[in-house]
Amino acid sequence: MKQRIAKFIADSGVASRRAAEDMIVSGAVIVNGKKIDTPVFFVDDTDVVMVNGKRINGKNKTKLYTFHKPINTMTTRNDPDGRKTIYDFIPHELSGLKYIGRLDYKTTGLLLLTNDGELARKMTLPSSKIPRTYIATVYGDLSKLDSARRGITVRGTKYAPMKIDVLDDKNLRITVTEGKKNEIRIVLAAVGAPVKKLHRISFGPIKLENLPVGKIRIESQKTIDEITKSF
């Protein structure tokens, strides 16, 4: 089955789809001996695709990695403001991995990466309802947390109920399934308990455990199978 050349390159694990498009425009991609200069080009496994002089194959075996994201780090490939990104910590040979969802600049903890763009897409769909658990250090009033537990609307956006356990007078364990941008920070601020620190400890069946900050580990095929069976 034919697919866009940028997706073919991304699925091979060489680069993200956006980076692949940049490679194409720069003339770094050759298909069947001819240089191409537009992402509107379709290939399949019968085509010979070369990127920077090296032949690549189509979709590789799915791999999934857990990364311990440091604070003050962008979940992006390149930051226009020059801030550190997760790829400053990830080994060069894994630089083609795609992140699954995002953690904001100040949020730390578990971030998943994969060479499989379709897996990344499915895992971030709200319909997948994969639970993500965080430890939130907050300040302010904890008396209105039941509003967040029931689900609330903030500035016209509806947020689903959150599972919230009070660990002590300033730390909460929160589990969400929607994955809306900054949802924990937005909801807790709205109920009078703004977040001071936010740290993700699990995503579906995967736990951060004792993985050091800035380090990455590969997950087992059993874990991948467990996740894909839930879709």
Image (cartoon, helix red, strand yellow):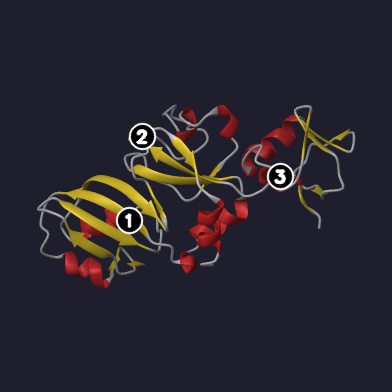
| Residue underneath mark 1 | 133
Report the residue at 42% width, 37% height from top.
74
Please identify the quarter of the rendering in which residue 48 is found.
top right
Tell me residue 221's x, y (percent).
Answer: 56, 52
Report how far apart the C-alphas of labels 3 and 2 lie in the structure: 34 Å
Circle 2: residue type:
Pro
Quarter occupied by the N terminus? bottom right
Report how far apart the C-alphas of labels 2 and 1 lie in the structure: 18 Å
Q: Is residue 18 above or below residue 42?
A: above
Q: Is residue 81 left or right of residue 161?
A: right
Q: Is residue 194 above or below residue 178?
A: above
The disc placed on residue 168 is none
Tell me residue 33's x, y (percent).
Answer: 90, 34
Foreground mark, 3 or 2, reads 2
Badge 3: how crowded within 10 Å, few (<14), some, or many (20+)? Answer: many
| Viewer-proximal residue among 225 and 55 | 225
- Disc 2 vs disc 1: Cβ atoms closer than 8 Å? no
Q: Is residue 11 left or right of residue 78?
A: right
| Residue underneath mark 3 | 6
Q: Earlier in the sequence, mark 2 or mark 1?
A: 1
Circle 1: residue type:
Thr
The disc placed on residue 212 is 2
| Viewer-proximal residue among 226 and 122 | 226
